[in-house]
Amino acid sequence: MSTVTTDAVRGKNVGTAPAYFSCHDIHAYYGESYIVQGVSFNIHEGEILALLGRNGAGKTSTLRAIARCDDPALKKGEIWLDHKPVHTMTTYEAAQNGVALVPEDRCIIQGLTVEENLQLAQIEEPIGWSIERIFDLFPRLKERRNQEGVTLSGGEQQMLAVGRALARDIKLLLLDEPYEGLAPVIVQEIERTLREIKELGITTVIVEQNAVAALKLADRAVILDTGTVVYDGSAEEVLNDEELRHNYLAI
Ligand SMILES: Nc1ncnc2c1ncn2[C@@H]1O[C@H](COP(=O)(O)OP(=O)(O)O)[C@@H](O)[C@H]1O
Ligand SMILES: [Mg+2]
């Protein structure tokens, strides 16, 4: 198991090259409920990190804390992305600075077509990919560009949610259970796209109950248990470590 080196996550003012993204000892609360209990990890630019753990381990809460959602409230710790202090930002500022959270429910906007959902993401700077480029990545969305977004299948809605993130100029893509409820063939299609996105240098955190799929995609893994990091190392090592999988992932 690799240890988390606190110096390296501090950002600029250390001797080694700083990680592209780091959260350092973050603590977050829903009201009085203390849920994220001192989480630290680093991600290098262009890496995919699988953030795993059993139900209720604090994965969604950690992603929400990173995206600076109001709930859970971040009360302590530092979050750095490309030398910028995300921990000092509002939700809006974090999004402006490249943090993109694709939530579990995908949040497709009712009453808007596929194309309008994408256009809405581009009503202000910083604009990312063009809509045509997003359609090149997801030909299924192109075919359905005039269809109402909420009438898409689950897999297509997930593609739209990822496409909408790419319509902004993002640096860190946070995916919460992107494979949930999807048929294996659709999961494979989305996996392929996530690999393409990685090739383009986008840094990704994937939270998944389908841990095996996430581990095969990811370079590294962090496992959470009751709001703390219990493993930080290579994804491959988790795939090969039965005890770790049994204790923390129930697979
Ligand atoms: N809005 C909330 N208010 C209070 N507690 C919450 C809220 N959302 C989640 N929790 C609690 O926080 C813990 C971690 O939840 P969550 O981050 O959703 O876990 P995971 O995504 O790993 O399944 C759970 O005990 C859950 O009950
Ligand atoms: Mg969750």
Image: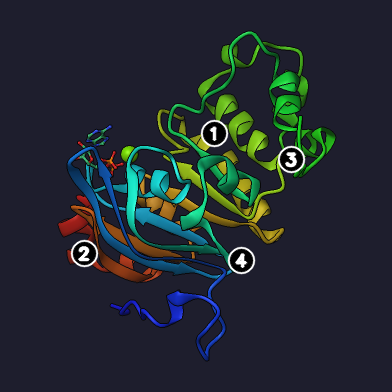
Name which residue type carries label 4.
Asp
Q: Quadrant of ligand 1?
A: top left
Q: Earlier in the sequence, mark 1 or mark 4?
A: 4
- Callout 4 crowding tier (Cα within 10 Å): few <14, some 14–19, many ≥20: some
For the question of whether residue 17 can be seen, the reply is yes
Name which residue type carries label 3.
Leu
**Which label was assigned to residue 137?**
3
Determine the secondary structure under disc 2: helix
- Report which residue position mark 4 lands on: 82
Q: Earlier in the sequence, mark 1 or mark 3?
A: 3
Q: CB atoms at circles 3 and 2 under 8 Å apart?
A: no
Above or below for 42 versus 87: below
- Report which residue position mark 1 lands on: 186
User: Alpha-carbon distance for marks 1 and 4?
Assistant: 32 Å
Determine the secondary structure under disc 3: helix
Q: Quadrant of the N terminus?
A: bottom left
Taking 72 as reference, is 103 left or right?
right
For marks 2 and 1, give the one nearer the viewer: 2
Taking 12 as reference, is 200 left or right?
right
In this view, the residue in front, 150 or 24, is 24
Q: What residue sits 67% from the left and 36% below the top?
A: 163
Taking 31 as reference, is 205 left or right?
right
User: Alpha-carbon distance for marks 2 and 4?
Assistant: 32 Å
In this view, the residue in front, 18 or 245, is 18
Q: Position of residue 114 (x, y in %)?
A: 70, 20
